[in-house]
Structures are given as C-alpha cells and as structure tokens.
Image (cartoon, grey):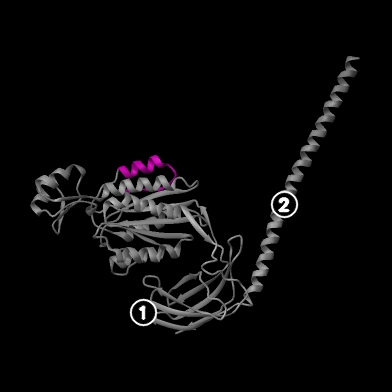
Amino acid sequence: MKKRLSSVVTTLIKGLSSVVTTLIIIVLVLVAIGIVWIVVKNIVINQSEFVETQKEFFSESVRISALKINKSLVSISLRRIGGDIKIETEGEKNETVEIVEADIISVVDLSGSMRSCNGVSSSCCSRSLNGDYSSDNCNTLNLDKENNCTFVCGGEWVDRLSAAQDANKELINILSQAEGSRIGLVGYNTTAVNSASFDLTDDLIQLNNKIDSWNVGGTTCICCGINEALRKLQQQSSGEKVKKIIVMSDGEANVKCAAQNTGNAAQDAIKASCDAKANLENLTVYSIGVGENANEGTLVNISNCGGGKYFSAINISELIDVYRRVAEEIKTTYKSTNKFILFIIFYSKTSSYKERILEIPEVLIGKDYNFNLTGKLEGNITKIEIYPVVVLNSGEEVIGPLFDVWNA
C-alpha cells in the first residue's frame, strides 16, 4: 500500500513538473515573439519613413543664386525653387528640452600668470616672491606669497588659480547631476601637464583632489591643451556619446604645436579646435576668457570653430558664475523638430569643411548666409556643394541627391 501511494505521489510530482516546465517554455516563447515583433515593427516603421523621405527629395530644389568670396569670408545666397517639406517659421519653431549624458573635458590654463603679483620690480620679484618676472608682473607664485606681494613689494595680488579651482569644482558638481555623464581634466602651460590632468570619470572625489593639486608655471600652449583633450576623448569616449571640451585661458597663446603647424601660436590654438571638431563625432568646443588680458579674438574663434560659445569673465569674481552657465548649457540640450536641413560643403585642393544650415528658405524665397572659414579650410575655395538632409524621427540623417554645385 505504501509503495503504491509513493508511486502515485511520484507520478503526480513528475506530472506537475512537466506542466510547470511547459508553462515556462510557453511564457519564454511569447516573450521572444513579443521582442521580435517590436524589433520588426520598428524596422518596418523606419524603413517606411525612409522611403517616404526619399520621395520628398524629388520635390525639393535649392539653388545658389549669388556668391561672394573674400579670402576665408564667404557670403552665399540660396533660393528655394520648389518643395513640399514644411519649414517652420521662427514663431512656430518647436523645440524639446532634454538632459543629456555627455563626456566632458575641462581644459584649464595653469601658466604662471594664473597666480601673480602685478606692478612690482624685478628685484622684489626675485628676492621676496621667488617668482618669474615679466613686464612689471611677478608670475608663478605660491599662495603664501600674498602678504609679501602686498606689504613688501607694494604690488597687486592676482589669484586666478584659486578661482579656477573653485569654478571647476562647481562645474563637475553640476554636470555630475546628469546620470551617465563623465568628466575629465586637462591642465596645460608650456605643454599639457600630465600630473594636472585626469581621465574621464564620474568619481567627484578624485576629480576634486586633482583640482586641489594644481600649481602654476610656464607659458601658454592652448593648442597643447585642446590636442590632449581630443586624445582623451578619442581613446575613452564612444562615437555616439555627446562630447564637450571647455577651454579656459587668461592670456595670449604663445607656444606653437607641431600637430597644427600654422607657424603661429594663436592660429595653432584655433586650428586645434577645428581639427578636434572635424575628427570627433558629436563634439562641441566652448571657450572661456579670464581677466582683461585674455585674447578674446583667439578664444572666440576657438569656440566658433568648435560649434560652441564664448564666455567672458573679466573679473575673477565672475568665474564661478561663468562656469555655472557653461555647465547648464552643456547639461541641457535643445532638439529642434525641424526635419529638413541643408549641408553646405566647401572644398579646397587639399581639404573640405561641412556646415549645417537649419534655417531653410521658404519656397520661392531667397536667403543669405555668411561663413568665416578661417582655420577651417586649407587654401582657396575650389568648389561648393549643396545637399538636402532630412532628419528622421529616430534622429538618423538621410542625405539626398546634390542640389547645386559651384566650381571656381
């Protein structure tokens, strides 16, 4: 009797196990079917949108109606002959705001002028301050020299380094709020300073410790800092990730870079930004000028070439606020719903440069555009091409057939 009962129980358990196994298999199959269906559905939708987009190209036509070239300055007039793709007016423009995760490198000037005693004699600079004398200013000083600067040498104490340290700590604190973002540091003076730099990370403690360790000395190689930031992003960031470089300086670029080889330190700095933008996907370069001796012309061109903005902090007290504004600019991005844009590609004999045009003329209406290609194109312009681009809902850009071409 006991054996028979045990046999029945065993049979029931085996039966239940088979039923449970079968149910699990059925659930897994249904889940797999659901996943496959979602993937297939998205592919079908994207392919359908792509086909419809291709049809739209055939109705569009934009032509070059006028062109003026003065060295690196280009004025071009475009006329939209026909088309069905709706272009939103300024009042209708619809933008969505989203917090983006990004890989950001802060490039910081650590040259001797970042901490100095101004308006002193060379003898007081060497004897009482142990600094580097240049044009009535004593540079490359430690914090403990402030009293000697003021009360012994009768100079004006200028400490941009401490302000830059506080500002960069505020920067990483704000940017760290965007989940998935990483921040790196590059310090530069006569060259990129490895001991003052740090790889991309989300570890705020390590970043703050590195910032606290910064010292000043040497001259100003802005292109060195940008080139090192580019190297870090190329090695440590992925192609689809949003990338940002923030370049800060308090003076003139006075060290050249072999990588750019323009023969001029300021032009090397500008070209370094152009090169970074051309060689790295999804990159924007911002620039910050600190103090009244910052070369704003160079810094503005650095940000222009990098597709970013220039920020000025003439007074040191403004620096933290400027870095806050840069951080908010980076943390929040605006995506336009405009789906039709243009690519204008400029060619020389040895290089090319692409500009995106978001504001397209209405049908039968012309529009003027101005470009400064300084540092963006080597040599004279030999050809200009106009291409249509439609942005799909997925964000993918579909490039259409050539609209128009100009040859020198």
Q: Nearer the viewer, residue 314 or 244?
A: 314
Residue drawn 54% across the image and 65% down it: 93
User: What is the x, y in percent for residue 288?
Assistant: 33, 57
List the single residue furthest toward the front.
91
Q: Which residue is mark 2?
A: 36
Instruction: Indicate left or right for 294 with 103 as reference.
Output: left
Report whether 260 appears left or right of 94: left
Name the one closer to the observer, 344 or 131.
Answer: 344
Q: Tell me residue 48's x, y (percent).
A: 69, 65
Residue that sits furthest to the top in the current view: 1
Of residues 98 and 134, the one nearer the viewer is 98
Specify the quadrant that holds the C terminus. bottom left
Residue sitting at x 13%, y 44%: 148
Q: Is residue 9 visible?
A: yes
Give neighbour class at mark 1: few <14, some 14-19, many 20+ (Cα, 10 Å): few
Amino acid under label 2? Val
Is residue 258 in view from this perspective?
no
Q: Mark number for residue 269?
A: none
Question: Is residue 197 rendered magenta in the image?
Answer: yes
Magenta residue span: 195-212
In the displayed structure, 25 sits above or below 405; it is above
Verify whether residue 225 appears in magenta.
no
Looking at the rendered structure, the secondary structure element under dot 1 is loop
Amino acid under disc 1: Lys
